[in-house]
Each structure stands twice: as C-alpha cells, then as structure tokens.
Image (spheres, grey):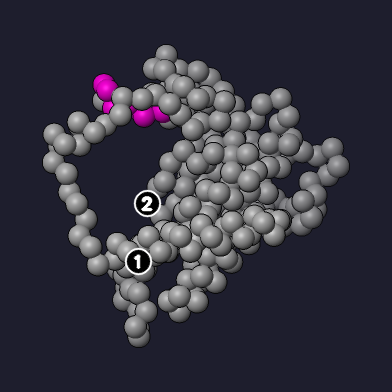
Amino acid sequence: MLTAPQQDEIRAIVEAGLDRAEGMANQHYVVFDEATFRADVQKSVSSRIPGHDLVTSDGQSDELICLVADMRKSSEHLMCAIDGNRPSQLKRVHYETSALLPALERTIEFKGGSVTEYLGDGILALFRVGEDEGQCIKDAYRAAKNCIGETREIVNAALAHRYNLPPLDVGVGLGMSKAVVTLVGLEGQEHPKAIGQNVYYATKLARGKNQIIVDETLNLRWPVKEGKGGLKFRKKDFNGVEGYLIVPGDD
C-alpha cells in the first residue's frame, strides 16, 4: 500500500506530467541534425542500475529482478479516434504516457527499485537482489502491486477529471536471474545495460490486464518461510513463453 504522503506525491507527479504534455500539445517537435545530436551527447558511463553507479565495458555479473510495466492497447489508443471533444489518438497517448510513466517510476523507487529505461509506453526497472533475497522479491512484488493498483487509479482519476478519458490498463512482468551489467552502443555513446534472462522474461510476461506475471525462477524462489502470503501462482502460456499469473492475497 502507498502511504498518504506517497499518494500525494504520485498525484503531484501525474498533474505535473499532464501540465507539461498540455504545454507541448500545439508545438512542433524540434528535429536535430546528426551533427548537432553527436555534439550534445555526454560521454558518460554513469548508471541507474542498482549497485552499479559506474559501468564499464568489461562487464560485471549480478543478480537482479527485472520489472517491466506496459500500458495495454496503447496502439489502439494511438490509431483509433474517440468521440466527443476528448483528446484522441496521438494527443491521448501523449497525455496518458506523460502521466503514467513518471508515476510508475516513483512508485518503484518507493520500494528500492530503479527505472533504467522508458520503453515508449512502458518502463523497465531493476532491483538488486543482494543478501536478503526474500525481501527483494517482496519489494519488487509490492512495487508491481502498487503500480497496477493505487498508482494506476490515481492516474486514471486525473485523466478522467481533466479529459473524460476512459481508464487505462497496465500489465507487469517480473523476471529474476543473473545478468551481465555492461556497456553497449557506439564508441563514445555507450549505454549501461543489464543483459539476462530476467529482462527477457519480464518483457515477454508484461501482457496481463492489471495483472502481475512472474517467471519460473521467481515462482520457485518466492519466500515460503511463512507461506506465500496467500498468493496463488497459476501457470500459463503467454505466446510461447511460460509464466505464472499471481492471484492476489495478503502479502
């Protein structure tokens, strides 16, 4: 559960994101030529990957939980006009992502995770497992639960109040594995990345509608000292990728 101050902070983030989006709605996007872009690139290997403030091309191995949250049916929102004077198509998706993505990021930070990539209509976040594996798994799950729960409700309330838009849905995938933390990209433009099965499975499993789906590793290593908190794990096939749908209980 989010605390009252955390809920207030999420609401402020949502409103600020929508204010910025509205301010840009009638402006043209500036397109920079390649020379200008290259001149502005910062040659930095600083990183937001937990436990890896600086990343080198040598690479390091670490165990991480990957959380991917994806706004469902955003392509339909982009391509299909809606009736009335409500924001539609590109403007609608712009407003939705401007509100949703920063709110998801802050929600994940509340539980110790770090968003390392925005994925168009979603986010990719990482949690470092460290010494207390059980606690890390619980933190990642609770962050995911808050994303599809209270945070999504706050975002939907703002979108409905401002624009009379219908509620949006979010799917979350969770994967856990060893990963290689390294740099990828052109020389001088390298990006810190975590490469592993955790990222693969989290991305493939972020397919539910306001649901959390985990990979085989998390299902097997879920803390069981006091049971799984009433949670049930239902095995399902998601377009050829096996995962476990979490049926909520007390966590």
Disc 2 crowd rating (10 Å Cα; few below 14, some 14-19, many 20+) is few
Q: Is residue 132 visible?
A: yes
Q: Nearer the viewer, residue 231 or 60?
A: 60
Q: In the picture, which quadrant includes the N terminus?
A: bottom right
Give the answer, above or below, for where 209 lies relative to 135. Answer: below
Look at the numbered disc 1 and give the secondary structure of its residue. Answer: helix
Mark nearer the viewer, 1 or 2: 1
Name the residue at 64% across, 30% down. Answer: 129
Name the residue at 53% across, 20% down. Answer: 61
Q: Which residue is mark 1?
A: 22
Q: Nearer the viewer, residue 246 or 135?
A: 135
Q: Nearer the viewer, residue 123 or 36?
A: 36
- Locate residue 18, reporting x and y percent: 42, 64
Segment colored magenta: 187-192
Name the residue at 43% across, 41% down. Answer: 117
What amino acid type should be assigned to the residue bearing mark 2?
Gly
Q: Which residue is mark 2?
A: 120
